[in-house]
Image (cartoon, rainbow, N blue to C red):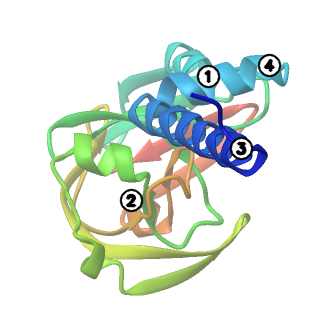
Amino acid sequence: MALSLGGRKLLVEVTGCTAALIIGAVALTHYQQTRQIFAKLAGLKSPTVASQERRSAAQSQERPAANGRRTAELVAQRNGHFFADAEINGRAVNVMVDTGASMVALTYEDARRAGVVPRDSDFTQQANTANGIARFAPIEIDRLAIGSVEVRNVRAAVMEEGKLDTTLLGMSFLSKLSRVDMQSGRLVLEE
């Protein structure tokens, strides 16, 4: 059966749209893998590799302070940032210390990992970020620890999915400590 010119054009368009929908569905289903592929094509480190490097590079040492308080010491990475393996509500989460953040800001994925699953209606607040304005869900973290340094009832924000690459350890945690001291590429946190 022969198709008219208009029929053939329509068939080509429908086939193209169907292929685009299938590719989009696969990309959404395999979001992390898709990000890694595009990062590799662009010559960038994949987000997963970068995150793993931060995790393996995050160093903290616990040592008792002279006054008997619990302390944790972080070593700056090559880029000058301080990363740490935190424990949020008993779950391991890699964080970056950010004194410019007014509160702890969790990535959507890290929040889920820590057992916090906000509904869309929970994203009631907005924040100015380096990437523009983003919505967030205000929460309170029951327990946040870096090594033996532990703080309870910490104000925090869960950022919209895809709006934050790394969980930020902001001032709502840091201001509850008795001492935060940075010298010679080392950051000391004292409870």
Query: How far apart are labels 1 and 3 at the CA level?
Result: 43 Å
Is residue 46 visible to us here?
yes
The mark that comes first in sequence, 2 or 3, is: 3
Q: Secondary structure at mark 1?
A: helix
At label 4, the amino acid type is: Leu
Query: How far apart are labels 4 and 2 at the CA level?
Result: 43 Å
Query: How far apart are labels 1 and 2 at the CA level?
Result: 37 Å
Question: Which mark, residue 36?
Answer: 1
Image position, residue 48 (x, y; %): 54, 22
Question: Which mark, residue 4?
Answer: 3
At label 2, the amino acid type is: Leu
The mark that comes first in sequence, 4 or 2, is: 4
Q: How many numbered dots are placed on residues in this image?
A: 4
Query: How far apart are labels 2 and 3 at the CA level?
Result: 76 Å
Left or right: residue 45 compared with residue 120? right
Query: How far apart are labels 4 and 3 at the CA level?
Result: 40 Å
Question: In which quarter of the view is residue 106 placed?
Answer: bottom left
Residue contact at pointers 1 and 2, CB within 8 angstroms: no
Give the labeled residue for mark 2.
177
Question: Callout 4: 10 Å neighbours few (<14), some, many (20+)?
Answer: few
Residue contact at pointers 4 and 2, CB within 8 angstroms: no
Front one among 145 and 106: 106
The mark that comes first in sequence, 1 or 2, is: 1
The mark that comes first in sequence, 1 or 3, is: 3
Query: How far apart are labels 1 and 4 at the CA level?
Result: 9 Å
Mark 4 or 2, closer to the camera = 4
Image position, residue 76 (x, y; %): 68, 29
Give the labeled residue for mark 4.
41
Left or right: residue 127 compared with residue 184? left
At label 1, the amino acid type is: Gln
Q: Residue at x 72, y 64 (%)?
A: 131
Q: Secondary structure at mark 3?
A: loop
